[in-house]
Structures are given as structure tokens and as C-alpha cells.
Image (spheres, rainbow, N blue to C red):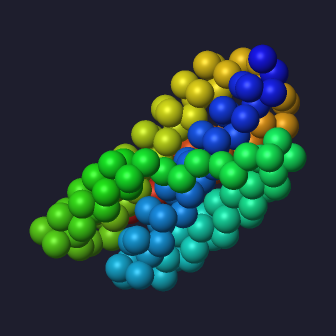
Amino acid sequence: MIEQDTVKLLRECDSGAKMGIQSLQDVQDRVKDDNMRRMLLTSIDEHEKLSHDIQEHLHRFDDEGKDPSVMASGMAWLKAHAEMMMNGSDETIADLMTDGCNMGIKSLSRYLNQYTAADEKSKDFAKRLIGMEEHLVQDLRAYL
């Protein structure tokens, strides 16, 4: 049970980190404010480092991880690009990123509660990713 919950939680963390990276990369070139752009680039770096650590831990279990679902990625991309076409302001980007972070926080918290038998390292990855998302939401409030 411990190994099964560990792998399942790691897969969700892997998917969440990849979704975060993808979403941040999708909008960072459109940001006008230099401070906001640096904030997003820093967040991309943090997500990539955590993603690498998660991947290393997954390999210990001979697991390749999990990509974000095609449906979730596609819907996020469609929503972001539709809203950016209507209003490509930094406020719109902050709003989109805040919504995405909040969805990630909610999902990861659910998985953390669901896979209670996961090892502590995997739980730590989930908590770190949740913390990164919460920190980004807090920083983005200045742009809403």
C-alpha cells in the first residue's frame, strides 16, 4: 500500500508540475511588466527543479510519471488564448495564472489527503508544489 500510494502521489505531483511549467511558459512572453515576467521565470525555474526531483524519485520505482491530461492541457490553453485575445493585459494573465494555481492547489491537496500511505518524501514534494503555487498566487495579487 505504501509503494502504491507513493507512486500515485508522485504521478500527480509530476503532472501538476508539468502543467504549471506549461502554463507559465504559455503566458510569460506576453507579460509587459518586467517584475511580473521575472516572477514567472523564477516560478518556471522552481517548477522545473521540483519536476526533476520528482522524476528522480519516480525512477526509483521504475515509473515514468504522468503527463497532464490532454483534455486539461487543451482546455487551459484554449481558455488562456481566448481571454488573451480579448484582453492581453498583465491583469488578465495574473487572473488566469491565479485560477490555474488555485486549481492545482485544490487537486494536489485532494491527492495528498487521498494517498495518506505515501512515503514522506512524496508528501513533501506535494507540499512543496502546493507552497510554490500559494506563493505565486500571493505575488500575483499585486497585478489583479
119 w.r.t. 68: above or below? above
Quadrant holding the N terminus: top right
Question: Number of marks in the image?
Answer: 0
Q: Position of residue 8 (x, y in %)?
A: 66, 32
- Would you say 137 lies left or right of 90 here? right
Measuring from the top left, give residue 19's x and y in whole percent: 50, 55
Residue found at x 64% / y 60%: 47
Instruction: Choose between 69 and 137: the one closer to the eye.
Output: 69
Residue found 13% across the figure and 68% down from its top = 86
Question: Seen in the image, is 94 located left or right of residue 41?
Answer: left
Residue in the picture at 73% in, 46% down: 63
Instruction: Please state if 49 lies on the left or on the right of 78 as rendered.
Output: right
> Is residue 113 among what the camera can see?
yes
Q: Quadrant of residue 87?
A: bottom left
Where's residue 45, x and y in %? 66, 69
Relative placement, left or right, of 119 versus 143 is right
Q: Quadrant of the C terminus?
A: bottom left
- Residue at horizontal 75 percent and vertical 61 percent from the top: 52
Residue 80 position (above or below residue 113): below
Query: Image quarter for residue 115?
Result: top right
**In-front residue for pair 64/40:** 64
Q: Is residue 136 visible?
A: no
In the orientation shown, which residue stands out farthest toward the left?
Answer: 86
Residue 126: x percent and y percent? 68, 38
